[in-house]
Amino acid sequence: MVTIRDVAKLAGVSPSTASRVMNDSAMISEATKQRVRQAMKELDYSPNYSARNLVKRHANTIGIVLPVRENQDFLGNNPFFMQLIQGIASVCTEHQFMVSLATGRTEEEMMTNLQNLIRSGHIAKFIFLYSKKNDPVFQFMLEQDVACVVVGQSYGQPTSQVAFVDNDNYRAGQDVATFLLDKGYTQICYAYTDMNELVQADRYAGYEEVMRDHQRPSYAMMLSRVDSEKNEQTLRSFLQKNRQIQAFITCDDAMAIRLQKLFKALKISSRRYAIISFNNSVLAEMAMPSLSSVEIFPMELGQTAARLVLNQTGQEEIAHITHEIIERDSTPNLQQPS
Amino acid sequence: MVTIRDVAKLAGVSPSTASRVMNDSAMISEATKQRVRQAMKELDYSPNYSARNLVKRHANTIGIVLPVRENQDFLGNNPFFMQLIQGIASVCTEHQFMVSLATGRTEEEMMTNLQNLIRSGHIAKFIFLYSKKNDPVFQFMLEQDVACVVVGQSYGQPTSQVAFVDNDNYRAGQDVATFLLDKGYTQICYAYTDMNELVQADRYAGYEEVMRDHQRPSYAMMLSRVDSEKNEQTLRSFLQKNRQIQAFITCDDAMAIRLQKLFKALKISSRRYAIISFNNSVLAEMAMPSLSSVEIFPMELGQTAARLVLNQTGQEEIAHITHEIIERDSTPNLQQPS
């Protein structure tokens, strides 16, 4: 039976240092950690997690908190979450941490489940895959002795207990507006579903600022995620009032495809308006014409969230992940009328 | 501190029975389990998982084995997996089991991670989210003292150690063929990417049998998932040789949308051919025209897999989950030429 002493000897460190590496202590340098992990690997050393947990009450598992599932389809239809989870899992695996999922059908069920996970002693670090104002689940977690990383818009300041990881949605909104302006479009409308969603509001604010800077008007049109008949009326009357419109920025790929379908229903050519959207999901490539869209790198969001929660050393942090416009057929250069 | 004795007293059972319920023993009736769980709830009793694991080496966690991630995008772009995981998590939560994820970039990494999970003592029950012939990861697990449920096509017979959960893909293939025949279509082609994928082969076999029963010909056309130029040639020459074709069955929604795009590229009206596909993913609704597609109920697949692995009592089992054709615009009744 290989012991921690054997690992320490091979790595040329003291047993207590080796043990600290296993606990991913912030006091140990990355170089030493690498050396100890290499030794663990060579000796095929696998710590007895149960024994360690009982003795040290030390957590070797990251808990992933999914949004409460009110709508059965929401998570499944959103590839974003699976990519986030993959990113988290890849970093945890590297650091010999396990990944557990916390789910619940209601907020009460979720809180009970989280309490059980915390009491079990394995988990003291959690990653929230969503950000919601006045979330009772998150409030509950703040009262526990755990560290949290939230993927999404920060509410309030980060603390030693809570960090945030997100895309810079304001900046992304600026970037798509600039992208369309550079292509010759000046009359651009932002199509959204709910400005209470901070992501949508931030992207709008970025777009709006760029339009103002270029002394161009801003337009906003609210569409429904479900009621396509109402959307048809909304779009028809919007276009009648604003015949000068040349392009649309939509809050996500699904909304862009809804817009394409509305054009079809109103017998408007699919090439009449440029469209750019966000998320660069599988839908963007499938659309006709294929959609220019903003890649938001969910794998990296997950990886960064995991690194933050594993190394959380009391530093307050809001991490921003980059984004990138992927250009496809829906945003050709504007043909000037001759 | 509430003990297992308090729980047993309130439930009116012996402490050893209460303990067996906590271990989800097959020897205890569902009614007794319910009573004990109710008592645990009323007393807010949370077992000390670590202590139990150390003493009893009893596992209270289900491990979910994801496909090895060769292609970073594969999982993320496949909503199926997230829905499976949700189904598994909901049942595990009900039974006070935790859910851990096993991931790896290579088969070797995956096996190391699985070994660590097993050695840790928490996990002796696993659910594979994929089924692949001659999979070294699965072979490795067969040599361990663990119970597995595989979501997907069964290879070989189930044993006391391995059960399978799947849709009845052969039946689903029969059903879509019958559906199109009932609508008046008689010249129907199956468009696939890889008959080595058992799902695709089974669906084809079901379709082929129904066509034979109705004394109608079968057609199969292989398309690529990536090379759309080659696909254009394949489709053009297939349609030249088979002018009588009226409808397509595609192996999944993404392939159906590819086919729609190919029609567009070849200047064929999107209404010229009926199309029906499988999976009823978010893509089906987004397509133009929207796609009739077979719902395969991934949430239920996950729930059934979890129930099977939790109650696995040495019974050999292959469970089949139902499916359902969701009718949309891509399969109108065939207009007979007048």
Image: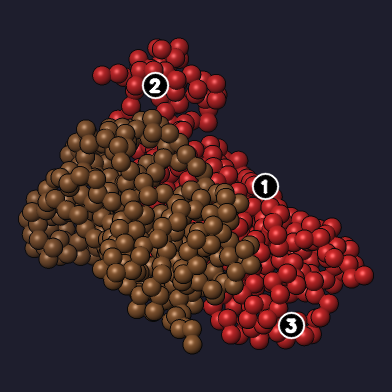
Chain colours: A brown, B red
The numbered mark at residue B40 is 2
| B47 versus A149 height, above or below | above
User: Which residue is at a point 49% across and 24% down the rendered structure image?
Assistant: B33
The amino acid sitting under disc 2 is: Met
Q: Nearer the viewer, mark 3 or mark 2?
A: 3
Where residue A321 sits, quadrant-wise, is bottom left
State whether residue B232 appears in this view: yes
| B270 versus B320 height, above or below | below
The amino acid sitting under disc 3 is: Phe
The answer for how far apart the CA atoms under marks 3 and 2 are is: 65 Å
Q: CB of mark 1 within 8 Å of CB of mark 3? A: no
User: Which residue is at a point 61% across and 85% down the rendered structure image?
Assistant: B230
In the rendered structure, the answer to whether residue B67 lies left or right of residue B155 reads left
In the rendered structure, the answer to whether residue B229 lies left or right of residue B220 reads left
| B212 versus A224 height, above or below | below
Q: Name the residue under label 3.
A: B238
Q: Do pointers 1 and 2 mark residues of a single chain? A: yes
Q: CB of mark 3 within 8 Å of CB of mark 2? A: no
Q: Total marks drawn?
A: 3
Label 3 resides on the chain identified as: B
Q: Which of marks 1 and 2 is in front?
A: 1
The numbered mark at residue A55 is none
Q: Do pointers 3 and 2 mark residues of a single chain? A: yes
The answer for how far apart the CA atoms under marks 1 and 2 are is: 35 Å
Query: Where does residue A50 sit, x and y in percent of width and height?
Result: 27, 41
Query: Where does residue B107 sit, x and y in percent of width and height?
Result: 41, 66
First in residue order: circle 3 vs circle 2: 2
State whether residue B112 appears in this view: no
| A187 versus B284 height, above or below | below
Describe the element under mark 2 as helix, strand or loop. Answer: helix
Q: Which of marks 1 and 3 is in front?
A: 3
Q: Name the residue under label 1.
A: B322
